[in-house]
Image (cartoon, rainbow, N blue to C red):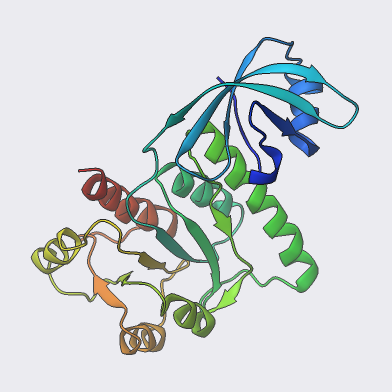
Amino acid sequence: MYRFFVGQDQIEEKVIHITGEDRNHIRNVLRMKPGEEILISSGENKEYHCAVEAFTDTEVLAEIRYVQETDFELSSRIYLFQGLPKGDKMEFILQKAVELGVYEVIPVAAKRCVVKLDAKKEAAKCRRWEAISESAAKQSKRMVIPKVTNVMTFSEAVRYASQLDIKLIPYELAKGMSETKELLEGITPGQSIGIFIGPEGGFEESEVEQAKAAGVMPVTLGRRILRTETAGMTILSILMYLLEN
């Protein structure tokens, strides 16, 4: 069943108003007919089971048949601070991170990043990344669309992370697996979690020291060196497993 997202102001007692690109997608791409069922989320832990009721020139009217409380979201909000990778790797990382439950993705222009974005390119990339986040959220039955922020410098990202309860940075020189296991298993539901993932080549030592000075804790993901597109998925998978249980 197809899922769509709306704002609270689009929901009435018995009807939801779907506008914009989703209205066009329902009518002209999916070619749905009155009576066909859809799922709608407004960013809460509520799932609206609806049926297409009617089409107008500007919106789709969806009849609310029933509302179901859900627990599809993780008990903690996870923020992924991702060093900008080369090529289209960011699109893959973003898609998989959304599927694994990330709450927000912060692209980071670290010192070893090869990619350099000017203001025009950054704006276009951010629009593309937001669209990928929304698509992945719909596919994976997320109740929210994870936000993708503007690109930050490493220093800006560290300051942005200061609000979070737990901050982690996978680092090849971190202590052994037992320390990492104890740290991750000590995270309690409801705590906000920040994860710093470096670009190709990782973070520079000075960046790691800056992060540690700000309370970011180094962790190890094993003896092997992981690619940037693998490291984030690894720790997100571990956290999803721990938080789901």
The quarter of the picture where the N terminus appears is top right
Q: Left or right: 194 with respect to 122?
A: left
Residue placed most toward the observer, 137 or 176: 137
Q: Left or right: 146 with respect to 162?
A: right
Residue placed most toward the observer, 122 or 226: 122
Residue under the image location 73 percent in, 16 percent down: 53
Residue under the image location 41 percent in, 76 percent down: 163
Q: How far across and how far down the image is residue 211, in percent?
A: 37, 83
Q: Residue extending furthest right?
A: 57
Count the marks. 0
Kindly indicate the quadrant of the structure image that contains residue 19.
Answer: top right
132 to 205, vertically: above or below: above
Residue under the image location 58 percent in, 71 percent down: 114
Residue placed most toward the observer, 216 or 199: 216
Residue under the image location 19 percent in, 43 percent down: 245
Kindly indicate the quadrant of the structure image that contains residue 58.
Answer: top right
Kindly indicate the quadrant of the structure image that contains residue 72.
Answer: top left
20 to 57, vertically: above or below: below
Q: Left or right: 212 with respect to 146?
A: left
Q: Left or right: 232 with respect to 190?
A: right
Q: How far across and how far down the image is residue 92, in percent?
A: 53, 47
Q: How far across and how far down the image is residue 231, in percent?
A: 36, 57
Q: How far across and how far down the image is residue 37, in percent?
A: 61, 15
Q: Residue extending furthest left?
A: 178
